[in-house]
Image (tube, rainbow, N blue to C red):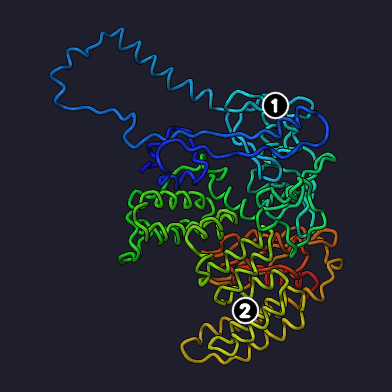
Amino acid sequence: MISRSRLPSGTWSATRPPHARSRLPSGTYTPSIATLSAASSGSRSNEHSLRNLFNTTILLPDAAQDRPRYNSQDTGRRDSRIMTNRQMKRCFLAAVVALVLPCVSRAEMRTWSDITGRFQTEAEFVDLTDGAVNLKKTDGEVISVPLDKLSAADQAYVRRRTGGESPASSTSDALVEFLSGAKVHGRITARNDQAITVALKVGGRNLTRQYSVDEIRSITIDGRREVLGGATGEGASSDGHSDTALSDGDTRRSRAEIEQVVDRLGRTPPDWWDSTPLDYPQTLDLSWPRKAPPPWNPRKNVSQYLFDMVQPNSSKWRGGVRLIHHLLEMHEDDQEKRQRAMMTLGRLYYHLLRDYARAAFWWRQAGVERSGQTPQGVQLADCYWKLGNKQMALDLLNKNSVYYSTIKLLADMGETERALRIAEAGARGNLPDLAYLHAGDACRIDGQSQRAIEYYEKVLDVRPTGKRAKGIQRNHQRARENIAAIKVFDTLDLRRVPDGVYRARTPAFAAEIHVEVTVQGGRIEDVTVTKHQEKQTYTALTETPRKIIEKQGVKGVDATSGATITSEAIINATAKALASAIGG
C-alpha cells in the first residue's frame, strides 16, 4: 500500500485526489489523456497537434523500493566505507544537483485544459505567438494551441507569464454578466478558478465585491468577451461554443458532462491547495472519536473545532477542508472514520466553499447517491442543479426521502407547485408552522407575493403550545417579518428613493442583524451587513446581499442553504431600510 508520504515530491495521482491516493497500487499508472479541443479553422499544424492523444506516466514506488536499509551490526565494517572530506563534498554536491535539477525542470509543468474542461495535458509553457500558445509536453514535443481555446484559468496564466494585461489585474472597466441575466460594471482586481473580485464605485463610495464563477456567464474587457458559463468555467457546449440561450432551470450540461466535471475536479486539488498550510491546534485529538467526550472543547475535539472556530471564520474554511483531508489519510484503514471524513468534506465544500463539483464527488464517494435517504441527498441534488443539470437533480429527489430542504430546492428549480404539494402534506403532520413557512418561501422565490403572504399568515394561525412553543413563536416572528418585507418590495418604487445610505436591523438567529443599503440613481447599488452575532452563516452574509442587488428586489432571491434564517433577516432588514427612505 502506498501512503502519500512515499510519493515523489511534486507528483499527483491522476485517478485520486492528492489527499486520497494512498490506496493506489504500487507500480506504474498510465492514464489516457485526450487531445485539447479542436482549434478553430486555420493552421494545419494546430489541427494536427490537437488530434494527438497523450499519455502521462506516473511512477509510484513500491512500499519498500529504494528505501535505505541500515543494520546496526554493520558498524564493525564501516572502515571500508569511510570517505575523505573531498569525496564527501563531491557526493554532497552530486546529491544536491540530483535533487535540484528535476525540480527546476518540472517547475513550469502544469495541467492545461481546453475551454470545455474535457481535455487536458501536462505541459510547460514556452511562449505566445500570434495568438497561439506553444506548449512543451513531458515527452519534449511542442504543440501549438489557440489561446482562446484554453480554459479561463490557463488564459490568465498565459497573460501573467507574457506580461500581458490579465483580467485579474485589469485597469480597464469590466462588464460581468451573470447566468441570472444581471450585470455588474467595475474593475477586476483579483481572480482565480473559484471567484473574481470586482472594485466598484457607488455613490462616491469605493466598494469591493467577490463573485463565485459558478454564477458568471461572461466577462467583457476592452471589447473582448470571455465566456465562463458555470462553476468550473465549463459552461460551453461540447463544441466549445457557449449556448447563449441558456437560462436558469434549463439543462446547461448533459449527464455525461456532469459526470466528467465531478470526477475530474474531485480527483484534483483546488487551486488554493498548495498555498493553504495544514494548520490546526496541536491540542486537537486527531483520533477523532465519533462521540466527543465532555466538556465542550473546540481546541481538542475535531467536530467542535469545525463548528466553533472554522465555520464562523471564512479565513479558516480552506484550512478546515485540508484538516479533514488529512484525517481521511490518517484513518485510511478505519472505514467508519473514512466515511465520516468523506461526508464532512462534502458538507464543507458545499456549505463553505460553494465548490459543488467537489462536494458532489465526496458525497458520491460516501455513497449518498446510492442510499438516497439522507438530507445530503437533497444537497447532492442541489449540486447537480447548480452545476447545470436539472433532470439529474429531479431524478435524485424522486428516490430520496422528503425533507423541508426538498421544498426549497424544488422552488429554486421552478417546480413551485410540486414544492407546495409537499409543503401541504407536511402541514398535516407535526410541524405545520415549518411547512407553511417553507411554502411561503417557495411562493416568494417564484414572485407570487400574495400567495406567499397567505401561507405566512397560516404560520401565524398555529398556536405556540407544548414543547415546541418557543420554536413556533420564533416562526411567528419570521412570518411577520417576511410579510412586512414583501409588502415593502411590492409597493416600492426605487425611482422615488433619494440617493443615499440607509440603515436598519431585524432579528436573526442569534441576535439582530444590522444592514446598510446604498441607493443611487433609482437602483440598489450595495447591501452590506454591518453587525451580527450569527455563527453558522456560511456564505449568507455576502451571497444574499449580492442576490438582492442583482434582482433589485427579493423576487427570485433564495436563502442560503444551511443559513436560511440569516438570509431572511438580511432580506427583511433591507426592506426596512428602504421603507425608512420613503417614510414607510
* Amino acid type at image mark 2: Arg
Identify the residue shown where x is 55% and y is 71%.
Answer: 511
Q: Secondary structure at mark 1?
A: strand
Please give left or right for residue 540 compared with residue 21 in the image.
right
| Mark identifier at residue 245 | none
- Work out whether residue 235 or residue 467 is closer to the camera in this orientation and state it: 235
Task: Determine the image quadrant of residue 251.
Answer: bottom right
The residue beneath circle 2 is 478
| Residue 118 x, y percent position in the rendering | 66, 45
Query: Residue at point 64% right, 45% down?
Result: 193
What residue did someone put label 1 on?
134
Q: Is residue 471 shown to the viewer in this render?
A: yes
Which residue is pictured at 35% across the width and 58% down the height? 288
Residue 243 x, y percent position in the rendering: 80, 53
SS at badge 2: helix
Q: Is residue 204 visible?
A: no
Using the image as rendered, state which of residue 516 and residue 17 is in the foreground. Answer: 17
Badge 1: residue crowd in 10 Å (few <14, some 14–19, many ≥20) = some
Residue 30 is situated, as x and y percent measured from the top left of the image, at: 52, 37
**Type of amino acid at the residue the image marks with label 1:** Asn
- Mark 1 or mark 2: which comes first in sequence? 1
Q: Nearer the viewer, mark 1 or mark 2?
A: 1
* Quarter occupied by residue 309: bottom left
